[in-house]
Image (cartoon, rainbow, N blue to C red):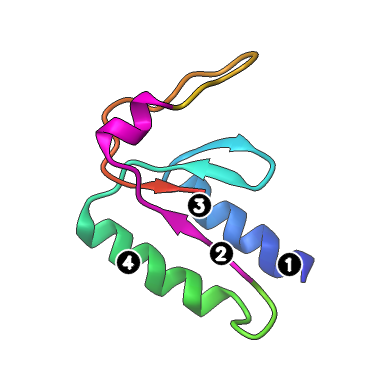
Amino acid sequence: MDKRRTKVMKLLKGYGTRVQYSVFECLLSRDELAKLGRDLRALIDVNTDSVRCYRLDSEAVQQIAIYGIGRVTTEPTHWLV
């Protein structure tokens, strides 16, 4: 399990910014999101693992509140959490 998690983390770091231990913000084109999905499915065990992708439009991004350090990635097309 930990080896898979490490591989997933390294893959996601190549696509976006790690904002928490297991949360990444990614600005992706449609093709990049499709490739990421394929790469994730190849890494995880679909029977025991769960990776969730949430797309946020510009209105939802404007509603993000950050308490403490950090900033919202600007003008995202897709967000991966």
Residue 49 versus residue 51 in the image, above or below: below
Does the magenta run of residues contain 61?
A: yes
Picture coordinates of residue 12, whole percent (x, y): 50, 52
Find the magenta span and give its range: 50-63
- The answer to whether mark 3 and mark 4 are in CB contact below 8 A is no
Picture coordinates of residue 56, whole percent (x, y): 34, 43
The residue labelled by disc 1 is 3
* Residue at 32 percent of width and 41 percent of height: 27
* Residue at 52 percent of width and 48 percent of height: 81
The residue labelled by disc 4 is 35
- The answer to whether mark 3 and mark 1 are in CB contact below 8 A is no
Q: Mark 1 or mark 3, which is nearer the start of the sequence?
A: 1
* Residue at 28 percent of width and 31 percent of height: 59
Does the magenta run of residues contain 13?
A: no
Q: CA distance from mark 3 to mark 1?
A: 14 Å
Amino acid type for the residue under numbered disc 4: Lys
The residue labelled by disc 2 is 51
Label 3 CA crowd tier, 10 Å (few <14, some 14–19, many 20+): many
Q: Mark 1 or mark 4, which is nearer the start of the sequence?
A: 1
* Residue at 28 percent of width and 57 percent of height: 32
